[in-house]
Amino acid sequence: MRNRIFPCLLLSLLTVLLFKASSQTHIPVPKHQTDALNKLIFDPRTLRRHVSTTAKPILTSLSNLPVSKMYSQVGQKENDKIVKLPGQPETGVNFDQYGGYVTVDAERGRAFYYYFVEAATRGSDGGADSKPLLLWLNGGPGCSSLGYGAMEELGPFRVMSDGKNLYLNPFSWNKVANVLFLESPAGVGFSYSNTTEDYSQNGDTKTAQDNVVFLVNWLERFPEYKGRDFYIAGESYAGHYVPQLAHAILAYNRQNKGQSINLKGITIGNAVINDDTDTSGMYDFFWTHALISDETISAIHKNCNFSLDSASPSCDSALDGADTVFGNLDIYNIYAPLCMNQSTTSPPKRPSIEHFDPCSDYYVDAYLNTPEVQEAMHANVTKLEQRWSSCSLGNPSRPIGS
């Protein structure tokens, strides 16, 4: 079977579902919420989107997720407080930050790493107490929400080119929300399991289940966020993770009416939802931007059916011609320069949010693999054999679909 490429940063898809949920402890789950989520869940066996939860295997599994793994969180919040990150600016850090592990399966020794930044305090706006809680998930599958989401996209800091110092991101989402970054499933980033077979058994349903367990226990650790307006956001393969987690939360709310999670909505950017339209859309994008020829796109349209698990020889031949694009440019940003030097620089280059640095991945890698940084973030407490990497599960470098 030909490896599929997730064109998640090529598709301009943004989906927002707002839930009319009560702010009370017991949150009813109107049927329209589940129906809306069903439209985002694609059944590859029937090549049709779900319209109801009846007799649909993936939705049935998500609707029956037991959440019985509750663990003591006494004193954990205080232990997770990050006093100061190495190299962070001396001024302008007007928010609290936390990092640590939440056990999702004590018997198997499975724990997820999180990084949490409370909303910045600005004047009399109330800061963290008045802002919603938002969970951010990167995709891959197998890519780190800490490395990409927090350190390169929407987090409060960016890493300078020396791999040692940080500068503030003026567009950080924690200006309007309390943002929780989660490395999931086990094997991604600093998240781990003491049961080796867990790494080969990851899947969408298991990830959704573990993420609900994570949230329930995290809210015990941070009880002030219980009942707070809660949103889930993500990109790329989070087109699977986000709606499936939302579906699992609704199921959890039905089963635990006294401890409901106040889910208000989800948002997905550049989502991987349907491999058929995603992949064909990527090659159409290449063609409309003059990256592949008329002959190549015609051959792809004639010979390729991306809804199938295998490709014909004629399709393979057409794609081989199109795939030469990948070696010549960054398909996530076709007008951007490529990184020609993967080393950090000393002294660091002048930082800039406005001017894209294609080598940022390598600065983040250097920073998060520094022992002092890991200690400050309460990460890698088990001293994993492998280095932290932005993408795991067989993805040695930044993969397609981060």
Image (cartoon, grey):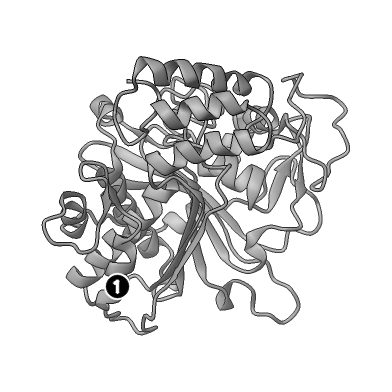
Residue type at numbered disc 1: Ser
- Mark 1 = which residue? 260
Q: What residue is rendered at 37% in x and 33% in y?
A: 306
> Label 1's element?
loop
In the depicted view, which residue is nearer to us: 323 or 36? 323
Disc 1 crowd rating (10 Å Cα; few below 14, some 14-19, many 20+) is: many
Q: Position of residue 309 (x, y in %)?
A: 29, 28
Q: What residue is rendered at 52% in x and 44% in y?
A: 145
The vertical placement of 130 against 185, above or below, is below
Q: Position of residue 307 (x, y in %)?
A: 32, 36
Work out whether residue 377 can be spotted.
Answer: no
Relative to 244, 7 lies left or right? right
Q: What residue is rendered at 31% in x and 45% in y?
A: 207
- Quarter of the image containing the N terminus? top left
The vertical placement of 24 against 236, above or below, is below
Q: What residue is rendered at 16% in x and 54% in y?
A: 56
Q: Position of residue 254 (x, y in %)?
A: 20, 71
